[in-house]
Amino acid sequence: MDKFLKRFGSRIKTLRKAYGLSQEKFAEKLNVSTNTISTLETGKTFIKYPTLKNICKALNIEPEELFRGDETENENLTNIMLIAKTLTPAQQKQLIEIIKTFNK
């Protein structure tokens, strides 16, 4: 379970940072203490369901996105995904075309 908690906490930290939120600002959004954020991100504790819902709401993600993270996940890929979610479908298609140019 410890390995899971550490990976889960790391995923929360990666997403928080991708949104440019400090632990303090994130704690304010969730109405919890900075210490709570710290213990979550270091894998020292797990979250209660209401906090899980609030994290997802604050980060504009679905709960499964928190659980699919991998400790080797590239932070840049996370940033690209989060930005892409805010784009219109037409803009997303443009982004895909731009990214494809790097594979040539």
Image (cartoon, rainbow, N blue to C red):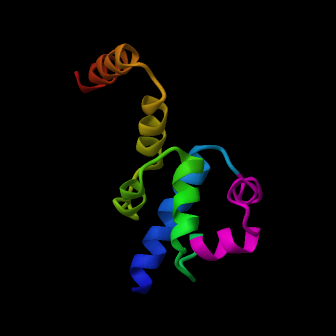
Quarter the C terminus occupies? top left
Compared across the picture, whether 24 is left or right of 72 comes to: right
In the displayed structure, 50 sits above or below 29; it is below
| Count of all numbered marks drawn on residues in the image | 0
Q: Write the start and end of the magenta stretch as one range.
A: 22-40
Looking at the picture, tell me which residue is in the foreground, 13 or 62. Answer: 62
- Identified at 56% across, 57% down, the residue is 55
Q: Is residue 60 magenta?
A: no
In the displayed structure, 27 sits above or below 43; it is above
In the displayed structure, 104 sits above or below 6; it is above
Prevalent SS, magenta region = helix
Location of residue 28 by image quarter? bottom right
- Identified at 54% across, 74% down, the residue is 47
Instruction: Estimate the x, y position of residue 45 in percent, counting from the top left.
Output: 56, 82
Quarter the N terminus occupies? bottom left
In the displayed structure, 85 sits above or below 3; it is above
Instruction: Estimate the x, y position of residue 54 in percent, counting from the top left.
Output: 58, 57
Looking at the picture, tell me which residue is in the foreground, 58 or 97. Answer: 58
- Identified at 44% across, 85% down, the residue is 2
Looking at the picture, tell me which residue is in the foreground, 86 or 54. Answer: 54
Q: Is residue 25 magenta?
A: yes
- Identified at 52% across, 64% down, the residue is 52
Instruction: Estimate the x, y position of residue 10 in percent, counting from the top left.
Output: 50, 65
Instruction: Estimate the x, y position of residue 96 in percent, counting from the top left.
Output: 31, 22
Compared across the picture, whether 53 is left or right of 102 comes to: right
